[in-house]
Image: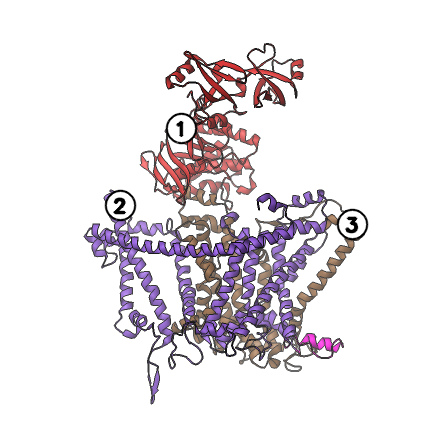
Amino acid sequence: MASVTLEHVKKIYDKKVVAVHDFNLEIKDKEFVVFVGPSGCGKSTTLRMIAGLEDISEGTLKIGDRVVNDVEPKDRDIAMVFQNYALYPHISVYENMAFSLRLRKMDKEEIHRRVCQAADILGITEYLGRKPKALSGGQRQRVAIGRAIVREPQVFLMDEPLSNLDAKLRNQMRAEIILLRKRIDTTFIYVTHDQTEAMTLGDRIVIMKDGFIQQVGTPQEVFDTPKNLFVAGFIGSPQMNFLKARLTKNGQGYAVQVQGITVPLEEKHNEILRRKGVGDMDIVLGVRPEHTSVRFGNRENAIESTITVNEMMGSELHLHVSTAAGDSVILRLPTVDLDDQTRQSLSYGNKLYFNFPGKVMHLFDPKTEESLLY
Amino acid sequence: MSKKNEVPEVDIVIDHEAGVIREVKQPGLRSKSGHERRVNGGIYTVLVIMSIIWLAPFVFLVFQSFRSYITESGGMVAYLLPKQWSLDNYIWLLTDEKSHFLQWYGNTLIIALFCAVIQTLMVLSVSYTLSRLRFKGRKLIMNVVLVLGMFPGFLTMITLYFLLKQLGLTQQGAIPGLILIYCASSGMGYYISKGFFDTIPKSLDESARIDGATRAQVFMKIIMPLAKPIVIYTILMAFMAPWGDYVFASYVAFGSEPNYNVAVGLYRWVNVNDYQGFFTRFCAGGVLVAVPITALFLALQKYYVEGVTGGAVKG
Amino acid sequence: MNDLDYLKLTGLSKLAYKCRQFFCGIPKKLAAFFLGIGRFLVKLVMGIGSEIKDVAATFANGDWKTKLSYLVMGFGSAARGQWGRGLLFFLFQTVFNVYMFMPNASFSGCYYLGKLSTLGTIETYREGRKTVYGDNSFFILLYGVLTIFFILAFIYTWRMNVKQNKLSEQILKSGKKLKSTKDDIKSLADEQFHKTLLALPTLGVTVFTILPIIFMILVAFTNFDATHQPPSKLFTWVGWDNFRQLLSSDSASYGNTFGQVLLWTLIWAFFATFLNYFLGMLVAIMINKKGIKLKKMWRTILVMTIAIPQFVSLLYVSKMFAADGLINTYLMKWGWIASPIPFWTDPVWARVTVIVINVWIGIPYLMLIATGILMNIPADLYESARIDGANAFQMYKKITLPYMLFVTGPYLLTSFTGNINNFNVIFLLSGGKPLSLELSGNAGYTDLLITWLYKMTVSDTNYKLAAVMGILVFLVCAVINLVVYNMIPSVKNEEDFQ
């Protein structure tokens, strides 16, 4: 069990291409950290540097108190689960799990005990005698995890472990990883491109893009207070709506004018803007679909729009609408309270009015793409 | 309707795990129209004619090897089937004291066995290194080998001959000399097995290294067991090549008859000696060489197929 | 022309456009090539400069152990506890010194190096019954090259030795420990595993391929031939004379013959590659067609020709086609022909015969390759084409052929250069015959450059011309490779296949 510290870590390929820029992060002991971002953002490269599979071009990496920049992967006391499982095809599941222990010349009885225990935790005891190719995808993934946990490593690395599984299995394995984590309390670093996985698994999430860290925080933090446009758009599903808007200062208070309506800001936001000395300016306004409200009766101070797509998700509706100014917006609407007649009216081509309160608004500077509020 | 069946249909698949081409029976009935039947008939005709052309020389070879040297003729004759079947030629080859055939055969076998072991080790080392390990100078090595490969092999023949002569490995020492020459540069033929190694996922190596294996252990414990098809292919190729080499073998063993390999000995019977007298003996010798090699080859055919198809696609 | 304009073009004009692009690009590429060489030279000079600077700086800043290492290699390493490395350095230096300055002067590196400019001046002769040994041009050249190799290796090792000292000092200064000899040996199975694996193959290739090739390239600039056989007759440097003799077209030279042989070599390589390719593909398609039974048997019958050693099968087939061979005798017996067909004695017949017999050799091989690739073509491509309304031939032309050509592009290239050097088939079938008075240098009508080279080496001991020919064959192959590499996309990137 150990902390992992990255200080000014950089990865440069061929002296030209920078894959990871100045990465600083301290991962506490027993913390579950998720690196998330679109493909090519450098999250896997960072993980592989921690594993020792890639050289670190600059900066220092510590596991516990030890600087491990030049330590071979086998001496870092880490375990890793790969996206394609990387099971050794020519030996049985048992031998796959025992492989690392045998290399360490561990006592046979101890190996047996550990393999059996891990197999028991993962529910793969009955497959121990099989070769990996006789297993299903989910079972293989369990074996890969089992191979990692028999080591009892200080740090547990997982590189997109669920992305080769189908949707249903993925949800199931996600839940199992949460349980697993409770049982083998150690440091986890988990890489994924799927924001749902990141949100559900991580104690903290590191959101990356183009080799830069965009934001580090708990799932709640990155959802509530995204620092920039990218994070705001990446976290949350369906994606946050972005609209061009104008921020105006009116005495001590601020208000946002968008699509013909004016929404005043809350006092705590006013205060932040005042402190920053923000004046009138064009902004990008972000509103999450679940924070909008559709106005059926009172159309005052609501944006007029036309329904283009109506997606029925079961417990809720996703309405894609097009505003008079031509922007498209997604609205999320619980279905419980809707009567039949209202549902009928929510079809293609019909008019719809919606608005939102000031406290759910995210304001971004269009030039820097940074949030004005957080 | 019938035309669609002329596509090279996927009713055979390459089974990569077993390394074989396997036929898969397609379920379902297909109505055979007249056109279809005519097309198939045509194909069968072509295939039968081809089979005859392909097999004929070997059948003839066998026939003539059984022609009696004593009662008929040892030379080329104007008829195919021997008038009298006999084992004269074989008996002469194997027992006559003027025949060096057994010695040649033994020489070639020794060379082939050594090559099979040493060349395989060399080729596997080079291809594994270039495929899996990343180090300074890797690209340089590959480019140098590429350039060297464009020089014709015989260019260096006399230099090699004198090098061997300095080491005392010509004429009487031709066997170890040939083994040395065949093996020394064999690492340059790494392409096909590198292509194979390239297809093994890199995450296996990485996983093993995290599990605590050194690179040497990764090579021995993970990659080698998976590389069985290509190991067999390499051994097969290394073993077969010396049986057919005339040029270097004749140059290195020049004038020392007991140190010829079969190719040199038999070639000299038909081209240098009076072949009219030795033709049937050549046929018999050819049969004795071809039968075991062909049997071995056909037994290991699937590995060969995998090697050449993989090699052709990979380049 | 922009992308969309290009996309509008059809088949031939696309090709024409590509060719035009290629040839228009040549001056640019040549310029880039020479610029590249220039840049490389500048880099080399600068590199050497900075190396020398570093060597001097290391000496100035180093401690006494480092300084002594400049004279006694490996001293610094040994003195700092790295016994293994130190010993290796020292051993290498000792061997080098002994070789260069051996007491027996006629075996030392210095002797060979000194004679290299003349290739020896004293011929061996007999004085009565005693042989008085002089120089031997052959060994002077061979060992001269070897000595130069050795000196370069020494300089490199010496530089490593200096660098080693500098690094060790730095490491010690920063308070870390140096690797022990035990660690060094361990690392040969891990971080340095490539050195372990490549050591023997590299040595083999250096001594038995690189050294001989450089030697032969140098021979091309000497008069080493039948009349200059050391030690009794020495050979010496003659500059570009041999190239002139082989390439110029006056009557005493081989220029005309060389041209003819080169042309035939290219024709041969073309047919041997493409005829086999298309026929092999055709056979593969036939055997793999749905509804054809006994697929495995047909394949095995064909594959037999690969298995049987070529000297058996080709020699036998060659005899079958001889004037008194089976084919002629049976054709005459059946009364189809009056006199034997001159398979091996008429130039045109001989050339056609070798190409046809090579098809017999080549089809099985290509059939196997084509089978493998055909089965990898995704079936849904054909299904989609069928839905689009394509017939069998159109599907072949639009799917099978392009797919095959794409994946086998690199193979076709290697196969073409391989056929330029296809010694066995020609040598065993025709031996280059028929000969002709119109061709000089003993060349025959079916001789390829490579078989001609062989004849020059073995029958004529005309090593100088053989060496020139070898260089020219290399140039032909290299040019073809370069041109094709620039035109086929699939050969360029190694990692694309991984």
| Chain A representation colour | red
**Circle 1 is placed at which residue position?**
A31
The residue closer to the viewer here, A348 or A156, is A348
Q: Which type of secondary structure does the marked residue at label 1 adopt?
A: loop
Taking the spot 45% from the left edge, 59% from the top edge, the residue there is: B145
Number of marks drawn: 3
Figure chain in brown: B
Which of the chains bears the disc numbered 3?
B
Residue count near mark 1 (Cα–Cα under 10 Å), binned few <14, some 14–19, many ≥20 = many
Does residue C107 appear left or right of residue A89 in this picture?
left
- Where is residue C314? Give x, y as percent: 60, 70
Circle 2/circle 3 CB separation < 8 Å = no
**Callout 3 amino acid:** Lys
Residue count near mark 2 (Cα–Cα under 10 Å), binned few <14, some 14–19, many ≥20 = few
Taking the spot 76% from the left edge, 77% from the top edge, the residue there is: C335
| Chain C representation colour | purple
Looking at the figure, which quarter contains the N terminus of chain A? top left
**Circle 2 is placed at which residue position?**
C171
- Where is residue C47? Give x, y as percent: 33, 54
Marks 1 and 2 share the same chain = no
Q: Which mark is residue A82?
A: none
Q: Which type of secondary structure does the marked residue at label 2 adopt?
A: helix
**Circle 3 is placed at which residue position?**
B32
Which of the chains bears the disc numbered 1?
A
Provide the major secondary structure of the magenta segment: loop
Boundaries of the magenta span:
C323-345
